[in-house]
Amino acid sequence: MDSIFIKIINREVPATIVYEDELVVAFLDASPVHPGHTLVVPKEPFVNMFDGDPETLAHMVKVAQRLAQALQVVVKADGINLHMNNGAAAGQEVFHAHMHVVPRYEGDKSYQKPRKQSYDDTGVDAQALGAQLSAQLAGTE
Ligand code: 5GP
C-alpha cells in the first residue's frame, strides 16, 4: 500500500511526529480542527477498521488516550473527540488507517452534531435489527 502516511512514517515527507513505538506513529494533522489535532497511524498499513488487526486497533486507542491526557495539559483541551473515518462514505480521504485525536473547547462550534432520527421515522424495527446484529456477532465469534 502506498500513501502519504507511509512517506511520513519513512521520513520521506516532513511531519511533526509527537510519538512513535513499534506499532504506531502519531503526528500533527496538517489541517487541524484545533492546534494539537493528532493522527495515530499504524506503521504496518491497513485501510481502515474493517481490515485492521484488532490488537493494533486496540493499541491505537491506548496511544490516543495518552495523547488526550497530554493535550489536556499542553493545549488545555476541555474535551477530546476521538474518531476514525472508515470508508469513503464515512468521510475517509486517506486510505491508510488513522485515528483522529481532536482537542475541543467549551462553546467551540467546530463540529456539527450528526442529524438523528427516531426508529419510527426509519420504519426499521429496532428489536428485530438488534436480534439480527446479535446473531451476526455470534456467528463471527
Ligand atoms: P480522513 O478524512 O481520511 O479521516 O483524514 C485524513 C487527515 O489527514 C485529514 O485530517 C488531513 O488534514 C490529514 N492529512 C492529509 N495529508 C496530510 C499530510 O501530508 N500531512 C499531515 N500531517 N496530515 C495530512
Image (cartoon, helix red, strand yellow):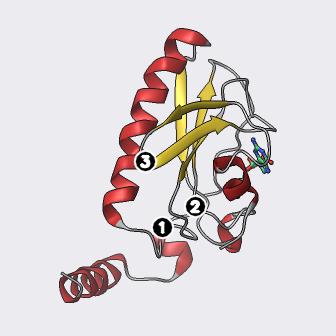
Q: Disc 1 versus disc 3: distance between alpha carbons? A: 11 Å
Sequence order check, earlier mark of 1 and 3: 1
Question: What distance separates the C-alpha of mark 2 from that of mark 3?
Answer: 10 Å
- Residue 29, numbered label: none
Query: Dots 2 and 3: beta carbons under 8 Å?
Result: yes
Tell me if residue 2 comes above or below residue 61 in the rendering: below
Q: CA separation, marks 1 and 2?
A: 7 Å
Q: Tell me, for residue 60, which label it has, or none.
A: 3
Q: Are marks 1 and 2 in contact (CB under 8 Å)?
A: yes
User: Which residue is denoted by mark 1 in the rendering?
Assistant: 49
Q: Residue at x 54, y 77 (%)?
A: 122
Q: Quadrant of the N terminus?
A: bottom right
Residue in the picture at 48% in, 67% down:
49
Tag 2 residue: 97
How far from the left and from the top, in percent, is residue 82? 52, 42
Residue 100, image x, y percentages? 59, 44
Q: Measured from the top left, where is residue 81 in percent x and y?
A: 55, 37
Q: Quick check: 137 above or below 119?
A: below
- Seen from the viewer's position, the closer of residues 81 and 32 is 32
From the top left corner, tell me how far across and down residue 119 is, in percent. Answer: 46, 71
Q: Is residue 128 above or below residue 30?
A: below
Q: Amino acid at mark 2?
A: Ala
Question: What residue is rendered at 65% in x and 56% in y?
Answer: 115
Mark 2 residue element: loop
Q: Is mark 2 within 8 Å of ligand 1?
A: no
For label 2, count other residues whose C-alpha is less than 10 Å away and answer few (under 14), some (14-19) or many (20+).
many
- Of circles 1 and 3, which is in front? 3
Q: What is the three-letter code of the residue carrying label 1?
A: Met
Quadrant showing the C terminus: bottom left
The amino acid at mark 3 is Met
